[in-house]
Amino acid sequence: MGCSMYRTSWMLGSSSLGRWGRSVAPLAVLLALAAAASLPGQAQVENTHEGAIAVLGPDSGGPAYEFAAQVLAQALGGIHVPVMTRGVPVPTPPHPGIVFLLPQTVDGDRLSALRRFRDDGGRIVTFGVQDEAISEMLGLTCRMESDPLPQPLRVVVEERHLPGAGEGLDQYVDRIASVSGADGEAVAWYGEAGGAVAGWLADDWAAFGWVPTPGDSEGLQRLLGALVARFDEEAALLSFQAMLDEFAVMGGFSGLGVVQAYVDRQGTDTQKRLLDAALGLRQEALAASEEGSAAAMMAASVRAEGLLRQALYGLMPPAIGEMRAVFAAPPSPGGAEEFVADLVAGGINAVFLYVGDAGTAAYRSDLLQSPAEGDPLAEVIAAAARRSEVLDIFAWHCAFQAPTAPEEVRKAYEDEGRLVRAGDGTTLPWLCPSVPANIAHEQAILTELLGRYPVRGVLLDFMRLPSQGYCYCDSCRDGFLTAESVPESDWPPISAARAADFTRYRQKTISRALTQLATDARAARPGTVVGATLFPSHRNAVAQDVDAWVGSGALDLLVPLYYGDPVAELRAALSQLLLRIDGRVLVVPARRPMPEREAPMDPLDVLRELEELRQSRVDGVALYAYDRGRGAELIEALGLGAFSAPSEPPYSVALDVALPPRPFPQAELQGYPPAEPLSLSVSSRVPGSGSLRISAVSMDGPQQTEVGTVSLVDGAGTAEISLVPGAWRLTLEGRLDAGGETIAIRRNGPALRVMSQREYEQARDSQARAETLDIALLSPGRGTAPLADEMRLIYGRQARVEFISTLTLDTLRQWDILVISDPLDLNLFTDQTMETLRGWAESGGRVLVLHNAVGHAGMPRVFLELADAFADDRVRTREIRLTDARHPAASYIDLPPTIELSNEDHVLVRPNRLDIALLEPAEGSEPERALAVAAPYGRGRVILCGLRLGQTSSGEDARMTRDESLLLEGMLSWLAEGVVASVSAPAAQDEGMLPDADPDQGQSGGPDPEGGAVGLSDGPAGAEGSATGG
């Protein structure tokens, strides 16, 4: 459990005090409060504040505090706010609510929020908080008698005032009050639950040599019983993790009390026997120590630790319906039986067995260099088929990798231009996926492999490029220029706009190759499960577009590689990934407990990671990379507990679950409305009838609830469910009768979010904004007021036109178009601001830059990729014209050949390409200078226009003429094309001049993976990078 419970006979004294003391007493009070909230006949804590209870923190005390915070939040019907969340939820009256404040550092922002919360009538309960600012804010503390929700309350607990021998809780509290300056008003949780608190505290402090007072054990037993009754299996898993964490903090036998409490609660007879044996050996060790026999003491301690570990391994309960995979190299000839037996004993149900790359094969092949003797793949498949347990074999294929090909073959590949090439001409032994011959080679490999061997599936590794610096081969150049309609003068694509286009081309190339190979795999062996590895953090760098992969239907299985990331930090990333893919593919993250050149992870640490992943609601885990000599202890540990019960892999369940469309598809926050039932469509690929229970598992905590049932008739059915706000993943469980056979089903369904009322209103407003045009004008600036008036006249209610004064990314994201006209505050344009502005435009923003803002009068030249500006590039004219009627933006400007302006002071720009020039003086000018240029910029668009619109020649505000208004409307309409449906392109438009960006793809940028050597030893997807220099 997540608490410190000990018996004095287990302890050597107070040796652990320095490592643990600070958090003991506050933690005990916390858990006592949580338990008292659910004790039958005890003081009941009723949440009458409509969910406005929050538990804030902690930032100290370790994992046990974190567990206590979650327990307290659940017991009180509230929410747990981790300390990383800045600010305190401040519910609005008439229900201000209660905040339980755990030990933490309170910054100025949070303290101000707490004061506002208190002033609005909120109540604050603190535990072990020593911050003087909080003490001053809370004022005098008060005693809690019968009211379970008192006025501001403080628990005074300081580690330097531990109880004395034989001192009971009452005396201890009185003593704390006398030394703490609390005017005699020390606080504890009294009333009917007082005895329970006394029992818990007594047992907690027994670790430090304090003898509990008589009667305390009864209160402790009541608390244990209450916790067992209160929390279900999910909470048991949570407490298992906390137990492991606390055991690790306490170290060795100092943590035996924690283990004993957990074993007493839900351990098996085997675990109890193991623990008793470990305790007996511990007594032998103590006796040997007293006799001065160090060797005997060490021997007994080592044997005791081994037994204790076995007990701990078996305490983690198994989960069903999950994929339990390992990456593995083929066993040595004759070793297949032992290889399979070891994995089956460990509860593994799938193995990603390395079968080779584009150069060699670990099986008998007519296309590639094969093993000198035997057929490892066939031997493993046969050994697995002889077992009654499920062990599915996946062919782990490193696509497009050629480092193992014979030297003459690699040389031929290079001569034929089939290898990936960096900008400096350097090549890697990696076949470029844009070359048709390379695709055909991979297709032939998969067709042969799957045609000969009855594997369950194929895992395509290395479906990517080495890094951002690849590939610039002739095939990529020709494909990019053709597919994106790019002139040869723009190769290589070094400008920001072209680089973003090239990133999208690279992603499309990989996605196209993946779809082709997946199609061929299923054609070669129908029913093949197709999976691929994913670099989650390097979408642009290595050209993996997971949205396109999932949307194409090419994949059944996604294996994101999370090797170096702390597992506790993956929860949010995995939740986001699950919500994005809507259950369309299985997600089985890969972890690396057995690195090649380092010691394997401690199995207890692996169990802790596995528990975190299970709480993320993924479909299983893949462990890299199994080695019988180095991974035996880990596989044994998994088989004793976490993987001890058989689990049918989720891809074996032929069940599809579809959700209704989200109501606000264009809103930034996606989800479903609160308090409205959701209609599910469930279909089985195996016709049959049956009933399935539908449960919803929280993606934010241990909560799980049954929400309905669905009846399937002839393999199809519908159901309506209702969920409270939050992020959930659905699970379906039951039986299906199909053709006289009963099929047991347990399957994860899609992930979804149900919005709160506030989130729903925000999404509705966001959707409404998405259906209109949002235009921001940078202020202060000359001519901005007349420009704003004119835009409002042009668009009416179809546009929102407002002024902004900052250029932060958070601000820019709220707008579709930004207009900059002669800004008066040049200090706004720092290097960081300009980089932010360029990045926003690259990712889809639209920018109209007017008059001096293009780069004159001290203004920086923000978009140098499009045009430059020089001080003497000015012109005095009142008549202008279109430079080229074929320019895509020209079709939006409905004006006569010559346009008359109200003033004559304008500036010129020097376009980097003549074809992007839009406007010029009517009498003409030098070809390399123009009054305006317009061009795509990544996913966005930019117009640099030197006209002085909305001003007189002296810079005073002036109303715009009709021609100027039409010109402004035309430029805005071209910028707005594709942003909202209400501002659409004209029917007739020349698409041949300028390529437009694909609005569904991401922007360029992103870190490169680490370098490393290609090959089996570097793991799935070259997790340590790709080839040298990648």
Image (tube, rainbow, N blue to C red):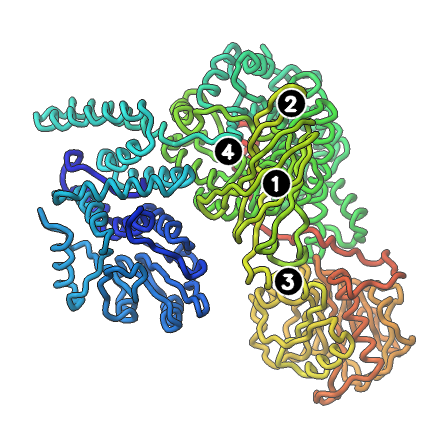
Residue at 23% across, 60% down = 145
Say what secondary structure mark 2 lies in: loop
> Reading the chain from its start, which is encountered first: label 3 or label 4?
4
Q: Which residue is mark 3?
A: 764
Q: Which residue is mark 1?
A: 583
Say what secondary structure mark 3 lies in: helix
Q: Quadrant of residue 142?
A: bottom left
- The amino acid at mark 3 is Arg
Q: Which residue is mark 4?
A: 621
Distance between the Cα atoms at labels 4 and 2? 35 Å
Instruction: Estimate how packed mark 2 is, as few (under 14), some (14 to 19) or many (20 or more) residues with alpha carbons within 10 Å.
Output: few
Distance between the Cα atoms at labels 3 and 4? 37 Å
> Reading the chain from its start, which is encountered first: label 1 or label 2?
2
- Which quarter shows the N terminus? top left
Residue 731 x/y as whole percent: 55, 38
Q: Which residue is mark 2?
A: 406
In this rendering, which labeled residue sits more in front, label 1 or label 3?
3
Q: Are marks 1 and 3 in contact (CB under 8 Å)?
A: no
In this rendering, which labeled residue sits more in front, label 2 or label 3?
3
Q: Where 993 sits versus 235, above or below?
A: below
